[in-house]
Image: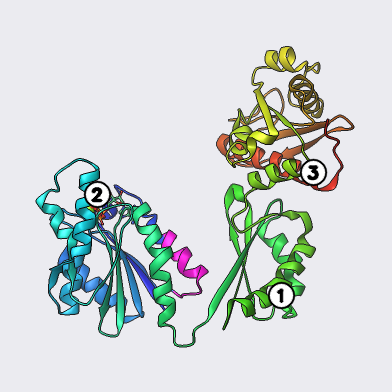
Amino acid sequence: VICNILCVGTELLLGQIVDTNSSFIAEQLADAGIESYEQRTVGDNPQRIAHVLTSMLGSADAVIVTGGLGPTHDDITREVVAEMMGVELHVDENVMTHMKSIFERRNKDMPESNMRQAMVPEGATVIMNALGTAPGLICPVADKFVYLTPGVPHEMKPMVTESIIDHITKQQSDQHVIVTRTLKSWGLSESELADMLADFVEEGESGSVKIGFLARGINGIYIKLSTSAPTHKDAEILIEPVEIRILEMLADHIYATDDETMETIVIDLLQKRSLKLAIAESLTGGMISSRLVDPAGASDVLLGCVVAYDPAVKNNVLEVKVEDVYSDECAQQMADGVRKHLGADIAISTTGVAGPGPDDGHPQGEVFIGISTKEKTFSQQLRLGGDRQRVREYATISAMNLLRQFLLNSEVASS
Ligand code: ATP
Ligand code: MG
């Protein structure tokens, strides 16, 4: 099946809002193995919506439309689609009840204009909207389908993931289940990754499992595996050996799988070893700490963070002795200092030049990451590219990654 994506809204054409709906839907379609040929945006104009929609249905089996389901006079998507279906609109009692209950909960009278949102084309199926008033609609147009969703991203998303993708997949004549896996890598370039996997891919060892790369900025490069089979179990049997081989080849360059993130993995490793972490940050200014408190469970392992930005704080609070704050020694002394000060088992630190421009004879992007335990203190020097913001973000993820690799490969005694 092929499914195209259409966004409706004059604000999109005027650049007042950025279209994030298309990329979200496109990713869901790709993950489900559904092809897509076109994405377009059209203003709130009935003739042009009808024209574009007809053209997009021509090259596909289905079109997902977002936007234009609101209560105002410029929200006209449902009327246009009813006309394409050649049917009338009628009031759907379930939707009406749902909308009334929303307004009752908010202690407000329902404005007359909201009635329009309970209007459903004859023959269309309603997708209830748990988070708002306008329902989604599954509309048969000749032998194809048009799916209507609200423009508001958090209302649209569950409709796509919980109802529409399933509905499209069921239209497939040869029913197949798609299984995907995302392996997240850090520290290698896309070409290095491609080289490391070249033999494996060229010799056809991956069989029917497709392998793709996706650059994700500070989240590294994702390796996407996907395959289809008649049942979920069959697909798992195909994908699993490929995943295992790639994990062997790339070893600890893979930091996480699917929904895991760098921070959930680091917190998890610390938790399993019952280790308490302390952090000292200079150029990252608390960014490592902020990311590590994100996952639930952080409170079990993270003691605290000292943002030692000024050299005087490095010196007074963390007992850094070395003069040059852009040095391995400084990173190590910061890590030692914060570990002792907070009574942690392990500590991590950052110092370096975020920029703009060089400082004290050190180039922008020169960064030092320190790690300290009772048994061992060491540091790593990095040269990061990009502007001030990018240097700080890359330093943050690099520090978490160094901590992850260290925890995987060494014994650390907990107190
Ligand atoms: P509403 O009931 O809120 O009017 P609607 O279905 O009519 O919903 P729109 O009026 O088109 O949808 O958009 C509502 C809001 O949703 C917009 O103001 C915008 O913030 C957001 N939105 C709409 N389309 C997109 C899109 N393609 N990408 C991201 N956000 C969008
Ligand atoms: Mg609207």
Among all residues in the image, which is located at the extreme bottom?
173
Mark number for residue 201?
1
- What residue is rendered at 61% in x and 28% in y? 285
Element under disc 2: helix
Q: Which residue is mark 3?
A: 407
The dominant secondary structure in magenta is helix
Marks 1, 3: nearer the viewer: 3
Query: Is 34 a magenta residue?
Result: yes
- What residue is rendered at 76% in x and 60% in y? 250
Q: Quadrant of the N terminus?
A: bottom left
Element under disc 3: helix
- Start and end of the magenta stretch? 23-35
Whole-angstrom CA distance, mark 2 to mark 1, is 54 Å
Quadrant for residue 98, please give it.
bottom left
Across and down, in percent, residue 111 comes to: 12, 48
Q: Earlier in the sequence, mark 1 or mark 3?
A: 1
Across and down, in percent, residue 199 comes to: 77, 74
